[in-house]
Image: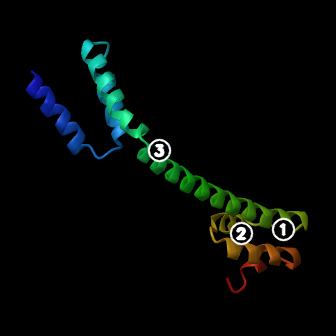
């Protein structure tokens, strides 16, 4: 039985391409309320202690910092896009669905800055997109 269980677990972790934490959770859930589940849980706890090392903590800190920077950049772009639309709306210009979608789909901060500048003086919302 140990051999076949070992082989089954080996196959799960070698052939399943999903995130490893999902496989681990699936295995634990599949074990139900059994002694094997306790063994599995203890094993996973021991393995996860690796991630408490100083090296792992630095690596995780770097990944978290990168993720936060990306999230801040995405937020800035979203806020800028909404600012473009707000200026157009405040000025009483008609904003078609196409204009709204194009502005919100833009991820280029410099282009959004250009559109924001144009939104201040445009006579129609479509003028944002002249030459760009």
Q: Residues within 10 Å of mark 2 (few under 14, many from 20)?
A: some
Q: Residues within 10 Å of mark 1 (few under 14, many from 20)?
A: many
Residue topped by disc 1 = 88
Q: For residue 3, which numbered disc appears in the image?
A: none
Q: Nearer the viewer, mark 2 or mark 1?
A: 1
Q: Observer-nearest residue: 54 or 96?
A: 54
Q: Observer-nearest residue: 54 or 75?
A: 54
> In which quadrant of the rendered image does the N terminus lie?
top left
> In which quadrant of the rendered image does the C terminus lie?
bottom right
Residue topped by disc 3 = 57
Q: Observer-nearest residue: 76 or 126?
A: 76
- Whichever of callouts 2 and 1 sits on the residue coming sooner in the sequence is 1
Residue at disc 2, secondary structure: helix
Please say if the residues under marks 2 and 1 sit with CB atoms less than 8 Å apart.
Answer: yes
Residue at disc 1, secondary structure: helix
Residue topped by disc 2 = 99
Q: How far apart are the alpha carbons under marks 2 and 3? A: 45 Å
> In the rendered image, which quarter is residue 24 located in?
top left
């Amino acid at each position: 039985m140990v051999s076949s269980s070992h082989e089954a677990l080996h196959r799960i972790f070698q052939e399943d391409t999903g995130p490893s934490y999902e496989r681990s959770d699936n295995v634990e859930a599949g074990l139900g309320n059994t002694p094997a589940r306790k063994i599995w849980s203890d094993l996973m706890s021991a393995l996860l202690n690796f991630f408490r090392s100083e090296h792992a903590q630095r690596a995780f800190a770097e990944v978290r910092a990168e993720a936060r920077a990306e999230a801040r950049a995405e937020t800035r772009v979203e806020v800028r896009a909404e600012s473009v639309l707000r200026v157009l709306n405040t000025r009483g210009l008609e904003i078609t669905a196409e204009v709204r979608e194009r502005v919100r789909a833009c991820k280029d901060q410099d282009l959004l800055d250009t559109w924001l500048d144009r939104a201040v003086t445009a006579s129609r919302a479509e003028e944002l997109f002249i030459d760009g």
